[in-house]
Image (tube, helix red, strand yellow):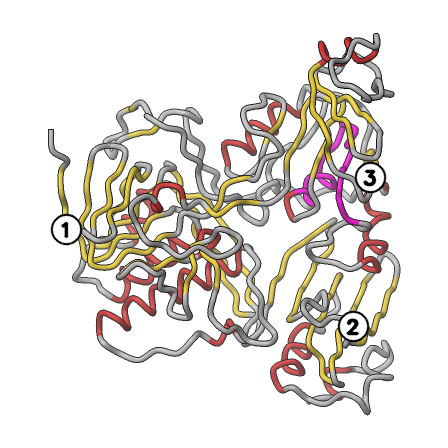
Amino acid sequence: MSAEVKTKKFVVVGGGIAGVTCAEQLASQFPSDEIVLITAAPLIKAVTNFKQISRTLEDFNVEEQPISVLEEKYPNLKVVQSAVRKLQGAQHTLQTEDGREFHYDKLCICSGGRPKLLTEDNPYVLGIRDTDSAQDFQKRLSKAKRIIVVGNGGIALELVYEVEGCEVIWVIKDKAIGNTFFDGGAAQFLIPSLQADKAERAGPCKRTRYTTEDASPTYSRAGVREERSIPSTGSALGPDWHADMTLQGAQQVSHKVHVEYRCEVQMIYTSEEHLLRASGQSPETGCMPPADSGPWPVFVQLKNGKTYGCDFIVSATGVIPNTGPFLSGNSFVLAEDLGLSVDDHMRTSVANVYAAGDVCTACWETSALWQQMRLWTQARQMGWHAARCIAADVLDEPIDLDFCFELFTHITKFFNYKVVLLGKFNAQGLGQDHELLVRCSPGAEYVKVVLAEGRMVGAVLIGETDLEETFENLMLNRMDLTAYKDELLNPNIDIEDYFD
């Protein structure tokens, strides 16, 4: 039976922030054309409460919504719930797992990333990436007395702080926590929060939450349950994914975290293998018997020689661009991190195929103060810019790289502190040719400024500092601060008025 073929001018793949933003922008700009958004999940991610804080700094919430909400908002936007089976770039066709085939004029791939797990197909290793895996984590945690979290990125930072009633062993390969976002000084500022009693939440999340009946089946547009031929993951979690989840373990302990620094996982084995090791019957030669004991279902041996038993392991070691369904038979150029290489118009190496978000890698000559990080803010910015570039191509109009790519900016929250990252906040790519200015008030704020050749090129702001807009302007203006650096972080000087 031949597949049903539908010709569409614009097709977007991915129900995450990049894909939804791109599809919404195209639907607004081309109201007489039908835009198709293909997503494997029954829920899409939408930007809500968007606030433009300054020229490049933006803040927003991410909300899960049924696909019907998007279709009601944009009558010319149709959402197809199915995984992608194959892309035939030369023929401009895209096949989905449910047997449909779409012919497109312009395609934007926003399929995100998938968890980079410690090991595949191990029932005791869980990667947290989408809503289903987060709910699985919550269910497992409710019966757990100890978990091991491996990784030092955003998901790991949130987990170790939010989990209650369960001992957490946190394994990181760096010498300080949060190495992706912070230096050692900021890490020391945050460490006391790991052991301190947390303030009570302001209250439960008030926004509507949508759930699916089951993690494995998919549903047709009519709501009929269908079998899925291959597994597919949903869109990545929002920045406040845990806000209305109860991350409570099986113990009465409040908040117990132990960090293993500069360490990696050497081996994972079951309780049966643990007994063999303890009795000296381990099949591996030169392997020390485990030091930890107890009725744990799984054990982790670290490269520093320590062994811990636990109920399950959270692998939070980053993501891999989800390019799988698109590569076979197509001449995509991949970057070193295996993302689809895109230019400053978000174009891939395949004609009329664009990409945005976690699946792609920015391979243009970037601004001196910008770098790609696979974060929510950049997913939205890339999706929006990709739609503008597609429109400019169709209308044969010139377009410049969006101003948001001039300066890296990101607002988030870690350990209940507001965190703002600007520019080369960790002195990325500067080598030894830079200077750091730091101001710290324990329990209140941490401010770090990165100077290069007398000019501010980066900053980390933790707490309610109210310095983000002033520092952004100083970076964009490239002002020489050599004469002012001794007073730049003086708490008795209103820096905003000083440079007004």
Is 161 a magenta residue? yes
Q: Secondary structure at mark 2?
A: loop
Q: According to the image, label 3 marks what residue?
A: 259
Q: Secondary structure at mark 3?
A: strand
Q: Earlier in the sequence, mark 1 or mark 2?
A: 1
220 versus 104 height, above or below: above
- Residue at the image point whose x is 55% and y is 66% from the top: 58
Q: Nearer the viewer, mark 3 or mark 2?
A: 2
Q: Is residue 229 visible?
A: yes
**In terms of depth relative to the viewer, which is nearer, 9 or 279?**
279
Which residues fall within the magenta stretch?
156-174
The quarter of the rendered structure image containing the C terminus is bottom right
Q: Inspect the image, locate mark 1, and give the three-letter code of the amino acid beneath it.
A: Thr
Q: Which disc is residue 432 wearing?
A: 2
Q: Where does residue 356 sit, x and y in percent of width and height?
A: 41, 58
Q: Residue furthest front?
A: 285
Q: According to the image, label 1 marks what residue?
A: 7
Q: Where does residue 281 sit, x and y in percent of width and height?
A: 79, 9
